[in-house]
Image (spheres, rainbow, N blue to C red):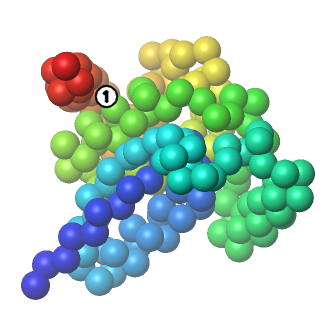
Amino acid sequence: MPVTIDYYMSLNSPWTYLGSAPFAEIAARHGATVNVKPCKFGPIFEQTGGLPLPKRSPQRRAYRMMELKRWREVRSAPINLEPKHFPCDDAAAVRLVIAARLLRHAASASHIAAAIWQELRRQLFGGGCGERCRISVQRNAGCEPSTARTTSSRVIRSAGRDSR
């Protein structure tokens, strides 16, 4: 019997970056399909009593940093632990994840998260993502840029209709 896993994730989370690839590998090894569902955890934290990172106690922020450093070593993953633009508006990257899913590119979410938390984060979110940056992220995610752009535009139009 085929298994589908709904994977709710936030590209703004370093834990998504650190855990998505191993999660996808485990799912693939067991023949499971992963249905990536990007979401915003900030409003969920607010409604359930959680605090955004800047409002957490210094002790909790220090513990988070210690854990990120530890997991960076465990995963041998390059990660910018204190990005200049955090948290950021990840709407463009989320549209790319949705477009990749619609185009059936399963590993795309982890590739896009890697681009966000590594070298391309500033370009993606700091001052808008230029065309070269967008194409690079799309190619690394396994998408043909022109197809991803068209599908992403459809995602934007569909979201506009759904919000009315």
Q: Residues within 10 Å of mark 1 (few under 14, many from 20)?
A: some
- Where residue 50 appears, as percent x and y from the top left, is 63, 52
At 58% across and 25% down in the image, what residue appears?
125
Above or below, 23 relative to 78 = below
Residue indicated by mark 1: 145
Q: Is residue 39 left or right of residue 154?
A: right
Q: Is residue 88 above or below residue 109?
A: above
- All told, the count of numbered labels is 1
Decide which of 29, 127 is in the foreground and name it.
127
Residue at x 83%, y 63% (from the top left corner): 63
Vertical placement of residue 148 versus 14, above or below:
above
Residue 106 on image: x %, y %: 29, 56
Residue 46 lies in quadrant: top right
Q: Which quarter of the picture shows residue 4?
A: bottom left
Q: Quadrant of the C terminus?
A: top left
- The residue nearer to you, when weighing 17 against 52, is 52
Q: Is residue 3 left or right of residue 119?
A: left
Going by the numbered disc 1, the residue's amino acid type is Pro
**Farthest-out residue, left:** 1
Residue 84 in sight in this render: yes
Percent from the top left, x then y, of residue 147? Answer: 21, 29
Mark 1: which secondary structure?
helix
Is 41 left or right of 101, judged from the image as shown? Answer: right
Decide if residue 106 is on the left or right side of residue 87: left
Residue 148 pos. (x, y %): 27, 30
Residue at x 45%, y 16% (from the top left corner): 131
